[in-house]
């Protein structure tokens, strides 16, 4: 799947806008950026997300990608986002949930 520059930048901006202490899902970011797939968000972050708060983006069930779990959960804990095992309670920490966005 080819990603045009405008979509790429929309994804980066959506991830950049997640506040500290909050999380979003790959699907949330796909919706905000009008991207065709949550998987595309993961691809963009893996290729060009090192300077973004990538750790604030989780899978739909509230878990991090397995290969990033330790680092991601540690970074989130540093922002006050606590996990139960390896799962973050999206009802509590999901960005936009308080305003009914998600």
Image (tube, rainbow, N blue to C red):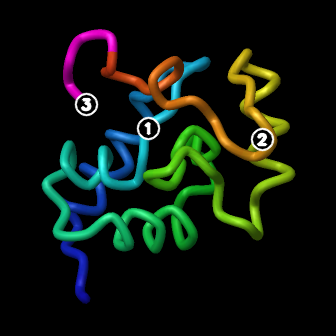
User: In front of the other: label 3 or label 1?
Assistant: 3
Q: From the top left corner, tell me how far across and down residue 68 is, in percent.
A: 75, 61
Quadrant in which residue 6 is drawn: bottom left
Q: Earlier in the sequence, mark 2 or mark 3?
A: 2
First along the sequence among labels 3 and 1: 1
**Label 2 vs label 1: CA separation?**
14 Å
Name above or below for residue 1 compared with residue 19.
below
In the image as oriented, which residue stretches furthest toward the bottom?
Answer: 1
Query: Crowding near pointer 3: few (<14 within 10 Å), some, many (20+)?
Result: few
**Residue 58 in the figure: left or right of residue 87:** left
Q: Name the residue located 45 percent from the left edge and 23 percent from the top edge.
A: 91
Residue for badge 3: 102
Per the image, the residue denoted by label 2 is 73
| Whether residue 79 is situated above or below residue 40 in the rendered picture | above
The local secondary structure at tag 2 comes to helix
Q: Residues within 10 Å of mark 1 (few under 14, many from 20)?
A: many
Q: Give the left or right position of residue 81, taking residue 71 as reference.
A: left
- Residue matched to label 1: 24
Labelled pair 3, 1 in contact (Cβ < 8 Å): yes
55 displayed left or right of 39: right
Tell me the residue at 84%/37% (across/down): 74
Q: Residue at x 31, y 53 (%)?
A: 27
* Dominant SS in magenta: loop
* Side of 43 relative to 4 (left or right): right
Give the residues in magenta. Answer: 98-102
């Amino acid at each position: 799947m080819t990603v045009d520059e405008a979509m790429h930048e929309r994804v980066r901006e959506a991830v950049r806008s997640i506040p500290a202490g909050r999380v979003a899902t790959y699907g949330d970011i796909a919706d905000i950026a009008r991207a065709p797939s949550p998987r595309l968000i993961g691809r963009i972050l893996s290729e060009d997300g090192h300077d973004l708060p990538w750790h604030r983006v989780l899978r739909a069930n509230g878990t991090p990608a397995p290969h990033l779990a330790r680092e991601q959960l540690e970074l989130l804990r540093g922002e006050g986002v606590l996990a139960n095992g390896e799962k973050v309670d999206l009802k509590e920490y999901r960005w936009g949930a308080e305003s009914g966005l998600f």
